[in-house]
Amino acid sequence: MTSRQMVLGMQFSGGYGAEPGAWRLPGANLNSYTDMDQFVRYAHSAERGKVQLLFIADTPVLDMDLTHHAPRQAIDPMLLLTVLARETERIGLVTTASTTFNEPYNLARQFKALDVISHGRAGWNAVTTSTPAAAANFGSSVPPRAEKYERAHEVIQIVQALWGSWEKDALLLDVEGKRYADMDKIQPVNLQGRHVASRGPLPIPPSEQGQPVIFQAGGGGYGLELAGRYASGVYANPYTIEDARAQREALRDAAKRAGRNPDEVKMLAGFMPTIASSREAALERRRFLDEVVDLHQRVRYLGTMIGLPLDPDQLDQPLMAQQLADAMPSPHDPRSVRALEVAREGWTLRDVLAHGVIDYHPVVAGTAADVADHMQEWFEAGACDGFSIALDGFHDGYDAFVDQVAPILQERGLFHEDYEGTTLRENLGAHEQYGLDLRLSQQARA
Amino acid sequence: MTSRQMVLGMQFSGGYGAEPGAWRLPGANLNSYTDMDQFVRYAHSAERGKVQLLFIADTPVLDMDLTHHAPRQAIDPMLLLTVLARETERIGLVTTASTTFNEPYNLARQFKALDVISHGRAGWNAVTTSTPAAAANFGSSVPPRAEKYERAHEVIQIVQALWGSWEKDALLLDVEGKRYADMDKIQPVNLQGRHVASRGPLPIPPSEQGQPVIFQAGGGGYGLELAGRYASGVYANPYTIEDARAQREALRDAAKRAGRNPDEVKMLAGFMPTIASSREAALERRRFLDEVVDLHQRVRYLGTMIGLPLDPDQLDQPLMAQQLADAMPSPHDPRSVRALEVAREGWTLRDVLAHGVIDYHPVVAGTAADVADHMQEWFEAGACDGFSIALDGFHDGYDAFVDQVAPILQERGLFHEDYEGTTLRENLGAHEQYGLDLRLSQQARA
């Protein structure tokens, strides 16, 4: 089988599921936020399904209202991934860490330690931070965008140089000759940027994959340039196939501009499936999840999406004939076309919302085949290289995906039957790299 | 049994042992530096021995020559302790983290996450950093001492406030009432110091012990004040009983000055035992360990300790009569008196050094009973509240201590027969604390 196959990553969030009401699902473990055993069970499920990686999105702040919603994030992503590193064998372990509010030495040390502990399965989603409340946790404010990205380049380069500061054959372990290591092969990096600097070396030998794999998220020209230069995987949030293809082309162009083969950069599109025995059962599940959501506010927002002044009192009724005639999708929200499509099918507004038309990623609420069909369509249209999957609720969602959706994708030849190797670099098809990418320095010299 | 009993902590270092040649010991796992399974085996041994805590000393720098010596530190202490948290049940997990080169928000988050993951067994050894090469890893230099300690107070207070920012009963988990948490009980701390600041809250509920226990190391007036105010445990490096008693009294006075009960602060004295079947076997082991040490340099230093110009050629001879007559212990090194005592017993200089007279902590090289006798003498003399034990080589040292020394101490009523509870706070006999210590704020107001 030489044809192209998709890369799948599972998002972990706070432990319950991607939907804020997931903690209330019947059968869910109410302590999932702090119960590491529960995360381990989900990781085992994903690994049974040959999913390439687990991903923890993170921002160093608690800025959401937890009155009705469970936290969106993990108590600490590095420590959680360390737990999973010990209790899984093949699945990749990727987390976000801010280039804006961390020191490169600390980032380099923890990610490489995770890489060694996991035997070569760590990945770093290197992102800038834009949340003022996160900045305030560090007694700081958010720097201007250009400055944030200048620092991001410096941080990533210093981190990679530190990763390479302990050469691959530095360890000798020669008992007879009384030589532990070859100090000629453990050298400072002495990098000084405008924003950050580090001397090195790092006290850590290479892992089975050399060093962690770099991921990136966040668009715009600055983000694309960062991804094009350093990333092997990119988290993207397109809402339509057209948008996704445009984003993927822009990303591949950015990689080419950095002197790289564009196939080295995999774009993973965010995707939120609700998997059930039927479409009606899927909608019912999502109506339950929506019980903690402010639906009155959402009805009003739905109105702005489709160009109508909607009244929350209409929640349990469909759009009326006159409303359907007047409705027009907003050009300012890429989700609007689909929202109107669903409304035209005659659903009540509650059910229109239950279809996930205002969710952060595209939603498919249906059977395993519906979910697989959507993924196939996107993948074959060249919209992405794979998906970053945010399951609505984890306690039954992981097994549902692994036992029902993954086998369909495998049967269709779209997803691998087993892991290609033991490291994230092998399973992602990422290029070999140790230390800084020499092609980048050659380009800089040219 | 109500009489006072000792607290024992085991130092972990780079994985081989406290002596730089430990990696070469027959039977040692050569990959101990990166092999987490090996650390887990030692932790299991220590836990079988009812040792109260494991301790990882750390400085964020690799500034030693690894040509002959294994690293002194762990690849990453937080990640290593996370591994151990999952694979042990009762033993405390303590590591150093710098107040000089870390942000309070990051420290607060990782230590509290470790506390939650370990079910209340985490401890933070809060120290300032004085190594220029460590500062250079952060593109910085070492601040003046007064400034470093001013920042340390701010960091510890902000960390403790962040730990308390999620009140103990904030989590509701009320499925029927659709209430996840009580946001009135999850509040920002908004602390602004001269050096650091943080808004909060932290995204982490309390652990079984509320929050991590604070340790301190490092002497002088500034260090004592820090320990007196915040610490439940202090790592000290006295070389004689007299010195240790003086340090302990100064520490207890500092606690009293801060308005605390001095019994709340336990002083752990550093101690390096070599446990063997006989004194001769212990010396032989230490001679082997010394094979990677520069003994010529040590002979010269031994000379300055005992006031003689010693020639390395004398390594395998004892001091001559005239030398013994001329020798005088240096007042500048507290180890000198013992060094001369050992030399007077007629050992060759190689064997004088093998007694550990120039080691960082007091050394006893002998049988388990010799080791227990030393600990009893110090403990009963009021020299310490327990010991921070740096075993010369781990691969057989952990079991030797647990199977041979601990039972003697237990038999003599000096060491507990079992853990008092499940948390570090319980097993250390530390006071209850959640958030900032209110007595300190009352004192500040007075």
Image (cartoon, coloured by chain):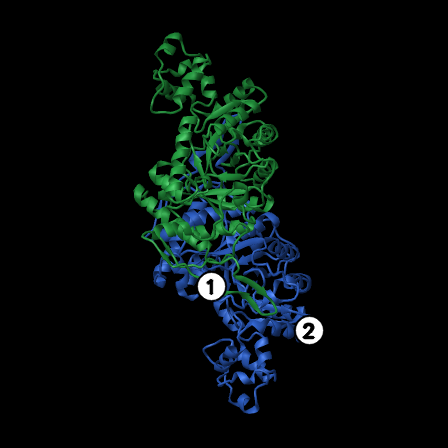
Chain colours: A green, B blue
Task: Residue at the far bottom: name it.
Answer: B322
* Element carrying mark 1: helix
In terms of sequence position, does the residue under pointer 2 or pointer 1 come before the other? 1
Residue A181 in percent (x, y) is at: 53, 64
User: Can you say whether B410 is above or below B344 in the image?
Assistant: above
Q: Residues within 10 Å of mark 1 (few under 14, many from 20)?
A: many
Residue A372 place in picture, x, y as percent: 54, 26
Chain under callout 1: B
Secondary structure of the residue carrying numbered label 2? loop
Instruction: Point out residue B226 in the picture as x, y percentages from the top left corner.
Output: 42, 59
Residues at marks 2 and 1 touching, judged by CB atoms closer than 8 Å: no
Kindly identify the amino acid type of the residue bearing the numbered disc 1: Leu
> At 54% from the left edge and 77% from the top edge, which residue is drawn?
B295
- Expressed as whole percent of the image width and height from the top left, the position of residue B281 reads 67, 73
Q: Quadrant of residue B126?
A: bottom left
Left or right: B1, with B79 as reference point: right
The one nearer the camera, A405 or B283, is: A405
Residue where numbered disc 2 is placed: B278
Q: Which of the image's four quarters has the N terminus of chain A?
A: top right
Q: Amino acid at mark 2?
A: Ser
Task: Compare residues B221 and A389 and report the one nearer the observer.
Answer: A389
- Closest to the camera, between mark 2 and mark 1, is 2
Picture disc at residue B251: 1
Location of residue A350 with respect to A251 vertically, above or below: above
Chain ID of residue with mark 2: B
Q: Give the quarter of the image for residue B314.
A: bottom right
**Does residue B344 sit above or below B240 in this rendering?**
below
